[in-house]
Amino acid sequence: MVKDRAGAARGFASRAVHVGERASNSGFVSTASPIYPTTSFVYDELSDMDAVFGNEQPGFVYTRYGNPNFTAVEQAVASLEGAEGAVAFSSGMAALHAAILNQVQTGSRIVAAKDIYGATSALFTNLFATLGVKTDLVDFMNIDAVATAIKETKPRVVFFETVSNPLLRVPDMPAIAELANKARATVVVDNTFASPMLVNPIRFGVNTVVHSTTKYLSGHGDVTGGVIATDEERAFEIRELTKLTGAVPGPFEAWLTLRGIKTLPLRVRQQSVNAAKVAAWLAADSRISVVHFPGHVRTPNIYNSELRGGMIAFEIAGATRKHVFQFLESIRLCLPAVSLGDVYSLVLYPPISTHRGLTPAELDSLGISEGLVRMSVGIEDAEDIIADLDCGLAAAIA
């Protein structure tokens, strides 16, 4: 096995480029990791295969159990998140499901933020409810409400997003983690919107970090995947669980994810710069009633001080669904599509996509208005993004 040339003490960008690469058991090393599109692996000595099957020595025997491309992604993410281990998955939802399933059983309680991705909310209130796991949805911007819920329910898991979907609220992660740790609850955080570039939750008492690698980590809109970063013991348990459930990525998908991670620092930096410009322009436009952007509000002093991410949400003043549709149909550079964190700018309408399953009353209770639009700012020229939004707003208002 070639030595780690990146080094644990190197900077974030250096680790993003190098960690996970150039592993070899032969006399030569490929500069870029090859793809291992194989189902199984062969050993000269059957005793070696036996030892790998028994977790007595590292290696690979069957791709559902592990693959060099998975390991490369896992090493990279663990390094960037400051975690002991990581486990790769076929999607972000598969990763989140495994992270929760690893911790709960019938009768367990979960305290979760009510302002979260719609599919995540459905996972808790629908799927896990059928397993006898009750979830209490709480306003995580109200630390007293979180403290009360943890004290009264004694949850097995406390869950929230570092930056909430879609209103981009930023809970006080260290305070919430401290409350949960005192109650011996496992803190699971979805760090997809922030990425490891903005914050490393494990540094602040979080036990398990989940990412949809489809988003910022991959960054090019061409691969679906997920990952869990956590301590060594949980990583082992989750990997054993995954051997049974089989929610692993394909080798090519893992390879694409690792390739995307190499440019994560460059992309997030440019997306943050662009988002700040776009948010400032939107805030000054009379056609916009509200702009939701972490850079415009005071957030806990744990995030990258120079960056505030590439996510924006804004409300078109007086807009109905028809107006928003006109806006989305009129933009040309920005893409009216789901997902986020890609190199190109993506704009979506939460009531018909991420939060489609909620009733109008439920949307209203979360603060998701009929005119709300969520935007993932890409790496295009900021002036072109703004000009495109201007044309879309002109069509919507007209």
Image: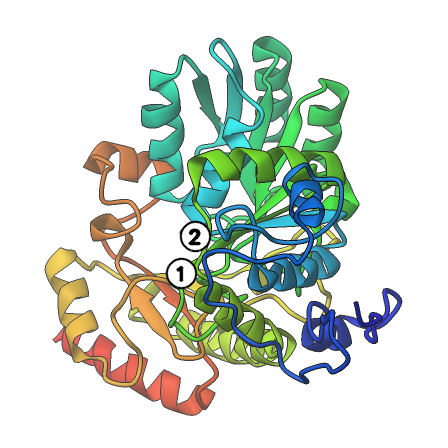
At horizontal 45% and vertical 69% (from top left) the residue drawn is: 252
At horizontal 27% and vertical 67% (from top left) the residue drawn is: 337
Identify the element where label 2 is drawn.
loop
Judged from this view, the residue extending furthest toward the front is: 45
Q: Which residue is mark 2?
A: 90
In the displayed structure image, the side of residue 229 where residue 355 appears, left or right: left
Q: On the image, which quarter does residue 335 sit in?
A: bottom left
Residue 267 versus residue 140: which sits nearer the camera? 267
For label 1, the crowd category at 10 Å Cα-Cα, with few meaning under 14, some 14 to 19 and many 20 or more, is many
Residue 256 versus residue 184: which sits nearer the camera? 256
Residue 397 versus residue 99: which sits nearer the camera? 99
Q: Position of residue 190 (x, y in %)?
A: 54, 46
Q: Which residue is mark 1?
A: 224
Q: Position of residue 350 (x, y in %)?
A: 28, 53
Q: On the image, which quarter does residue 82 sit in?
A: bottom right
Q: Is residue 234 above or below residue 259?
A: above
Q: Is residue 359 above or below residue 330?
A: above
| Label pair 1/2, CB-CB below 8 angstroms | yes
Q: Is residue 340 above or below residue 145?
A: below
Where, quadrant-wise, is the C terminus in this rendering? Answer: bottom left
